[in-house]
Image: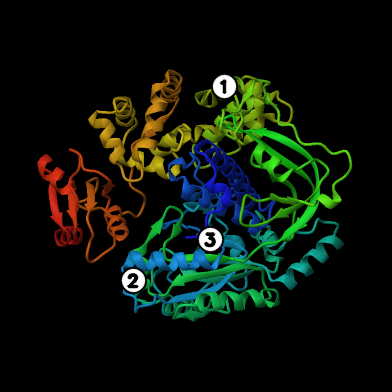
């Protein structure tokens, strides 16, 4: 396990929640800039460090998982202008590692999951991590039929016409090949080609691209395919999608097969067969990084045995069997010009440093989060100081230190405001806490706007064209005050058309985007409500357990009684527990929230939970399973993953709603409780037989 940062150890629950909320906001902002706008504002290392800090805090405070958990997201929603393509198998991203210790943890997790003996080392294929645009290529009878971007991992943009212009992409495969085949890889641009392209753009009076990744992404996402054809785009293939290995037993054999079909591979690569090989390859590639003809931002390790990959499966947004070992980033010095204070959705006041723009890792940075007022005082950060900006290992950009030798004369310590800069309400800091919060509640425009923005965000209702600025304008004009008001904007069509910069076309487009979201799934609605600690993954757990909006609402109201069966059932849901359960129940105690939910029910059609596309049907579908004791032939993690893949619900405690209790060695009292309640108790062998028959 990576060592905890000293400041994380000292955080209280409230401080940690505030830090996580700020990280969620930054990550969502940069996801949109990178995946949809192809205009990243920070370097990849800076973005990776944001996520790394997020994971480190969440590791210490797992009960504080934010409502907009970025670990449950992949990329950003598809942009307007392209038709949409649904991925048969989700295109997930990779988890990141930043140190040798992280890699050791990764290997150890695989060993524990698979219960490998000490004398067996899991082999890995290591390859460079290309910094480009992920794409999926679908072939039927050996002919390219559809190409798509990753998008949000579930739905991407149809870029077939553009991809057909890339010379590296074979339009017909070299036989033999499966009838249906999906190749996944990266569209990129060589560094030399990038430089040549930028020289020509400057000659033509056009703005140069910031980096090869931006150039590749911007070139392939042109509505006019002739523009894509004029750009020097390339493609590396590295994985299969809908078509699995087709009988292939290893990742290395899969790479060889992809090459035989006519694709280029990301090289150099290495088969790592013993302890130490992964880090040795990483060091080798790190030294060769700038000599390679294309940009890379790390090394990817993939478990070699495909049957082990299938056993390990996926968690949230990434596979358990692969990881990206990212390169370390850089530091830079610059002047701090001002300190401003931003107000978040929960009312937390967060200080932000406005910097003299400085280039770090090829990206211009002009802002850095300062966490809280105690952090400013501890580092004695003052306006006018020359500060060191760190690009990795903590919240990024972060002010690491101050160069006191260069401090201007007559500077003074920053005085944190005692009133909200947005609404003027008193900002209170409770004794023993570092977070100062606005007491304005719903009258505070920052909090109101952030709550509405969350409701319309990609993982929630995903209303296109309903960004922060638009939400703020409509709120200020009192056209929307609650989530349901969004669906009544059609009544204000004439008013909207008279707004400066809008016009009939933009209003029609917005109203159509709103109407397209009048029917939503239960998990999206639960997430959109902004219940504390209920992120995307937790919303899915609740939707899967309660199935319909009326059943969920009825259960949450009943669960207000801590001794009720409804409360026990809620807390028994795997990964829920008493803290998240309490926050879920608290939401329904507040009359205002019940009114909001009732109002939404009048304008929305909320669909019952449906299992994800491609999930198998079995006799275990919807059954609740509890595991207790030590299993002999599989780890607890693998048993849980197998149960969930068959549609079962895994709970942490036994109740009257439990269907099966699977008992291993040294089982506790759960088996006794199950027998007392008349719940079926299975041995490990009986459980495996039941799974095989399902």
Q: Quadrant of residue 381?
A: top right
Asked whether 628 or 123 is in front, the reply is 628
List x then y, in percent, for residue 111.
36, 69
Q: Give the mark nearest the N terminus, 3 or 1.
A: 3
List x then y, in percent, for residue 270.
52, 80
The crowd level at tag 1 (other Cα within 10 Å; few <14, some 14-19, many 20+) is: some
Tag 3, which secondary structure? strand
Tell me the residue that label 3 is attached to.
96
List x then y, in percent, for residue 130.
60, 68
Where residue 466 is drawn, which disc sits there? none
Q: Is residue 413 above or below residue 332?
A: above
Q: Are marks 2 and 1 in contact (CB under 8 Å)?
A: no
List x then y, in percent, for residue 89.
41, 58
Tag 1, which secondary structure? helix
User: Residue at point 46% right, 22% down?
Assistant: 596
User: Residue at point 77% right, 36% down?
Assistant: 413
Foreground disc of the pair 2, 1: 1
Foreground disc of the pair 2, 3: 3
Tell me the residue that label 2 is attached to.
307
Tell me the residue that label 1 is attached to.
442
State the CA–CA distance, disc 2 to disc 3. 23 Å
């Amino acid at each position: 396990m990576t060592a905890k940062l000293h400041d994380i150890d000292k955080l209280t629950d409230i401080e940690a929640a505030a830090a996580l909320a700020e990280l969620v906001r930054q990550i969502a902002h940069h996801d949109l800039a990178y995946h949809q706008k192809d205009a990243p504002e920070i370097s990849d290392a800076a973005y990776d460090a944001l996520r790394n800090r997020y994971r480190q805090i969440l590791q210490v405070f797992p009960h504080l998982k934010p409502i907009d958990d970025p670990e449950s997201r992949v990329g950003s929603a598809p942009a307007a202008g392209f038709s949409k393509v649904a991925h048969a198998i989700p295109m997930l991203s990779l988890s990141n590692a930043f140190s040798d210790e992280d890699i050791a943890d990764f290997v150890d997790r695989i060993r524990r999951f698979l219960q490998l003996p000490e004398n067996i080392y899991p082999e890995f294929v290591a390859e460079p991590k290309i910094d480009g645009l992920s794409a999926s290529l679908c072939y039927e009878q050996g002919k390219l039929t559809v190409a798509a971007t990753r998008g949000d991992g579930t739905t991407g943009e149809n870029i077939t016409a553009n991809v057909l212009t890339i010379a590296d992409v074979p339009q017909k495969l070299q036989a033999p090949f499966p009838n249906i085949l999906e190749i996944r890889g990266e569209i990129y641009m060589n560094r030399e080609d990038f430089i040549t392209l930028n020289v020509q753009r400057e000659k033509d009076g056009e703005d140069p691209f910031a980096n090869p990744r931006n150039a590749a992404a911007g070139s392939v996402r042109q509505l006019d395919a002739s523009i894509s054809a004029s750009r020097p785009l390339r493609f590396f293939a590295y994985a299969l999608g809908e078509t699995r290995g087709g009988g292939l037993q290893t990742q290395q054999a899969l790479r060889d097969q992809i090459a035989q079909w006519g694709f280029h591979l990301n090289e150099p690569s290495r088969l790592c067969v013993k302890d130490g090989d992964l880090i040795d390859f990483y060091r080798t590639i790190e030294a060769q990084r700038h000599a390679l003809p294309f940009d890379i931002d790390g090394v990817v390790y993939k478990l070699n045995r495909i049957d082990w990959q299938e056993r390990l499966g996926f968690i949230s947004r990434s596979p358990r069997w692969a990881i990206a070992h990212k390169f370390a980033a850089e530091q830079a010095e610059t002047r701090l010009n001002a300190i401003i204070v931003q107000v978040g959705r929960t009312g937390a006041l967060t200080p932000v440093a406005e910097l003299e723009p400085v280039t770090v890792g090829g990206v211009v940075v002009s802002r850095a989060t300062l966490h809280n007022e105690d952090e400013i005082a501890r580092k004695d950060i003052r306006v006018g100081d020359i500060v060191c900006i760190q690009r990795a290992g903590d919240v990024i950009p972060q002010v690491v230190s101050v160069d006191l030798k260069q401090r201007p004369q007559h500077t003074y310590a920053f005085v944190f405001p005692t009133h909200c800069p947005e609404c003027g309400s008193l900002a209170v800091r409770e004794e023993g806490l570092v977070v100062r919060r606005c007491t304005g509640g719903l009258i505070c425009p920052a909090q109101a706007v952030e709550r509405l923005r969350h409701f319309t965000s990609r993982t929630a209702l995903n209303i296109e064209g309903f960004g922060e600025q638009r939400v703020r304008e409509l709120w200020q004009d009192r056209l929307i005050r609650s989530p349901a008001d969004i669906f009544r904007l059609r009544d204000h069509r004439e008013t909207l058309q008279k707004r400066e910069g809008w016009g009939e076309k933009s209003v029609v487009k917005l109203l159509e985007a709103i109407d397209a979201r009048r029917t939503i799934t239960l998990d999206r609605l639960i997430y959109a409500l902004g219940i504390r600690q209920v992120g995307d993954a937790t919303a899915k757990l609740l939707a899967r357990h309660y199935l319909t909006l009326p059943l969920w609402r009825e259960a949450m109201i009943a669960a207000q009684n801590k001794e009720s069966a409804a409360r026990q059932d809620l807390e028994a849901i795997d990964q829920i527990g008493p803290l998240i359960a309490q926050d879920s129940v608290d939401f329904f105690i507040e009359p205002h929230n019940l009114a909001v939910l009732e109002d939404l029910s009048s304008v929305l059609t909320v669909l019952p939970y449906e299992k994800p596309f491609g999930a198998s049907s079995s006799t275990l579908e919807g059954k609740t399973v509890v595991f207790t004791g030590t299993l002999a032939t599989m780890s607890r993690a693998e048993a849980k993953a197998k149960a969930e893949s068959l549609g079962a619900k895994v709970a942490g405690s036994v109740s009257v709603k439990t269907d099966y209790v699977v008992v291993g060695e040294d089982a506790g009292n759960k088996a006794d409780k199950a027998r007392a309640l008349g719940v079926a108790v299975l041995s490990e062998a009986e459980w495996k037989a039941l799974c095989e028959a399902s």
